[in-house]
Amino acid sequence: MNTKSPNPYTAFVKDFFTSYGCALVEQTPSYFTIQLTSEMDEEIMNRPFYWHYMKKMNREGDPMQLTFTDTAETHKQGIYLHAGTPKLHMIYNTAIEKARTARLYEVIYQTKHPRNRAMSPWLVINVLLHYRGKQAKDEPLSIGLNLIHGTMMLKMMDKIQNIDFETKVSDYTFPMTPVISLVNAYKRIERHIETYLSSLDNKWVSESLHHLEKEKQLLESFYQSEDIDLESFTKEREQIDNRYKPYVEIEVINGGLFYISQETSAEWMAQ
């Protein structure tokens, strides 16, 4: 009886490559081979001079194949997938980078009597607010803005997580042309975040400043008593500022343009 657990990285690597158009050309219980596209070869195979030459000569180039093994105990030559595989970490980084933006369409399942449906564009931005001071915490925000009429919705990831999406438009549907530009929509979301931050209780700011001042006074007393020299005093002063000076950093995690049916959009706004 074979009790060996399946390699936990295999499914992810297969899904990653096939989702970007790479073909699975061979598969066995112990290994699989992927045919890269030209774009993916250029992305992860570290052959910049080759692809520069191909483009210069106006040629298509010859993308490589990659073989991955599920176990180190195989006669097949390939990349053994485990936590320390350098190529696996490169794939992770590529997946993260590519996932920063997306354009997706709600899947519309047709009835016996299909009808044309308009799809409303929503700009969805996911951000992480980093609060730093005496205490540190992070707060995620997910905000969507309808690019037709400007309605703004909060907790957008909660709303879209149960909806099926594809990278192409479903039959009998058509994407509406945005009325609000992406730039203006992003600025509206930025202003909302700024308004939200200004409405928060700033007690943590005053507490951080108070603690910062106490730490500086204590350090000053050490310096006055000649317990530390000027160089150490200066370095410690900088570290105290870095640790306790309150600020909020807004980090944009990712964003996307989601085309949602008007029926789904209406349900959201009615809630």
Image (cartoon, rainbow, N blue to C red):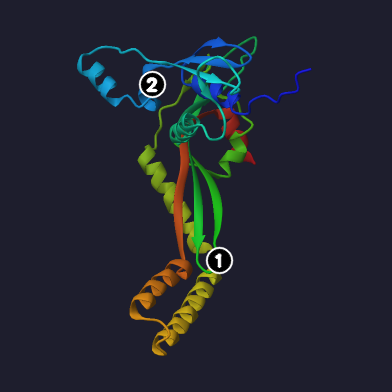
> Residues under labels 2 and 1: Cα distance?
45 Å
Q: Residue furthest left?
A: 56
User: Which percent across, then down, holds residue 261?
Assistant: 55, 27
Between label 2 and label 1, give the one nearer the viewer.
2
Dot 1 falls on a residue whose secondary structure is loop
Query: In which quadrant is the N terminus drawn?
Result: top right
Q: In the shown orientation, is residue 90 left or right of residue 69?
A: left
Using the image, determine if residue 86 lies above or below residue 58: below
Which of the two discs, 2 and 1, labels the residue nearer the N terminus?
A: 2
Residue at 61%, 21% in the rendered image:
73
Is label 2 in contact with label 1 (beta carbons under 8 Å)? Answer: no
Residue at 39%, 47% in the rendered image:
187
Which quarter of the figure has residue 75? Answer: top right
Query: The disc labelled 1 sits on which kind of residue?
Result: Gln
The one of 228 and 116 positioned closer to us in this rendering? 228
The label on residue 173 is none
- Please name the residue that numbered disc 2 is placed on: 41
Local packing at callout 2 (Cα closer than 10 Å; few below 14, some 14-19, many 20+) is many
User: Which percent across, then down, holds residue 271?
Assistant: 65, 41
Residue at 41%, 42% in the rendered image:
185
The one of 35 and 267 positioned closer to us in this rendering? 35
- Please name the residue that numbered disc 1 is placed on: 135
Dot 2 falls on a residue whose secondary structure is helix
User: Which percent across, then down, holds residue 147?
Assistant: 44, 36
Using the image, determine if residue 223 lies above or below residue 59: below
Query: The disc labelled 2 sits on which kind of residue?
Result: Asp
Q: Is residue 235 visible?
A: yes
Q: Residue furthest bottom?
A: 225
